Image (tube, helix red, strand yellow):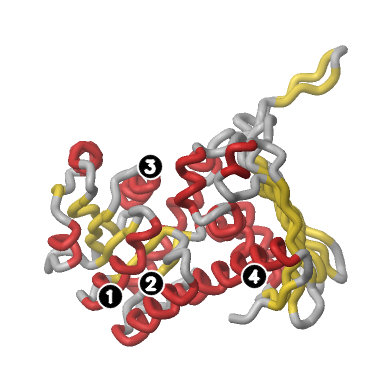
Amino acid sequence: MTLKFGLLGAGRIGKVHAGAVAASSGAKLVAVADALPDAAQAIARTSGAEVRSVEAIINASDIDAVLITTPTDMHADMIEQAARAGKAIFCEKPIDLSVERVRRCLDVVRAEKAPLMIGFNRRFDPNFRAARARIDAGAVGEVEMVSITSRDPGPPPVAYIARSGGLFRDMTIHDFDMAAFLLGEDPVAVFAAASNLVDPAIGAAGDVDSASLVLTTKSGKIAQISNSRRATYGYDQRIEVHGSKGMVSAENLRETTVEVANASGYLRDPLMNFFMTRYTQAYANEIAAFVEAVAAGRPMTPSGEDGFKALVMADAALKSLKEGRQVEIVY
């Protein structure tokens, strides 16, 4: 079986997913839609797909699944339309910036029994998945503490900040999902501290650019998250999981593994500097997992519920920051 895709959104991340579909032996990109015709045409030319309207793709009989990579404020509506049209759905995070809107959207998804995967690509990173596999195999015993470092090479444009929903809903949301993934439990409380240390314009736009958060679960497990919109040394992505029998970690990826040693010391190449190169294999793996799940009729992971929970954590973190106290996370 070849799963036939329609791509809704031909921007930067849309191109990545179009490439992942092309690389999958069980998938084919049939059509692409975008508000900018040139962007849609560019992907169509390289993939052999047609350019169609959003409505035509969602209602097409020759398309089995849709990839939603449009701006966030369009996600929930498109998910609902695709669910009612009987499509399998892959949607980039978040479903929406409003928890209540996400609730209503997921009600439709459940009513239509539509397969829905949310694009938390880091779960599919080979190194992070290998760490999770070691945990499942009992290598560290009972998980007790998780540390997640996630720092961008530089801040995005302020115009993006204003539309993104802020650091916690845009950037930390990946780390909230990763925390639950590594802890094996959903956090029930959060304490957040944050500042503007990178770009005053981000503060003027009502957001923060540097944050530290502590999450706790009902059983007392702890996750620590460190975020920054600036890491001069590259895209800093690390995890560490400490347990009753030991520790497992996954380090940063570098441009090469070459190391030069001389009288000046040890010199290594810098970290990968862009999320698309750092997580190239993760993006490919998540599309492959989506295709396999549809073919096998298996539940999707990460699910719409996982996306909902990560957004609830983000809102609780915002409340913690505003009130200067630990806040209960109520799903």
Name the amino acid type tagged 1.
Answer: Ala
Where disc 4 sits, the SS reads: helix
The answer to whether residue 48 is above or below residue 60 is above
The image shows residue 183 at horizontal and vertical percentages of: 71, 70
Give the foreground label among 2 and 3.
3
> How far, Cα to Cα, is label 4 from label 3?
30 Å
The image shows residue 273 at horizontal and vertical percentages of: 58, 33
> How far, Cα to Cα, is label 1 from label 3?
25 Å
Where disc 3 sits, the SS reads: helix
* Marks 1 and 3, the one that precedes in the sequence: 3
Numbered badge on residue 12 = 3
Residue marked by disc 2 = 116
Q: Is residue 144 left or right of residue 319?
A: right
Numbered badge on residue 316 = 4
Quadrant (top left/top right/bottom left/bottom right) for the C terminus: bottom right
* Marks 1 and 2, the one that precedes in the sequence: 1
Name the amino acid type tagged 4.
Answer: Ala
At label 2, counting other C-alpha atoms closer than 10 Å, the crowd grade (few under 14, some 14-19, many 20 or more) is: many
Question: Which residue is drawn at the image coordinates 74% and 77% (left, top)?
Answer: 217
> How far, Cα to Cα, is label 4 from label 2?
24 Å
Numbered badge on residue 83 = 1
At label 3, counting other C-alpha atoms closer than 10 Å, the crowd grade (few under 14, some 14-19, many 20 or more) is: few
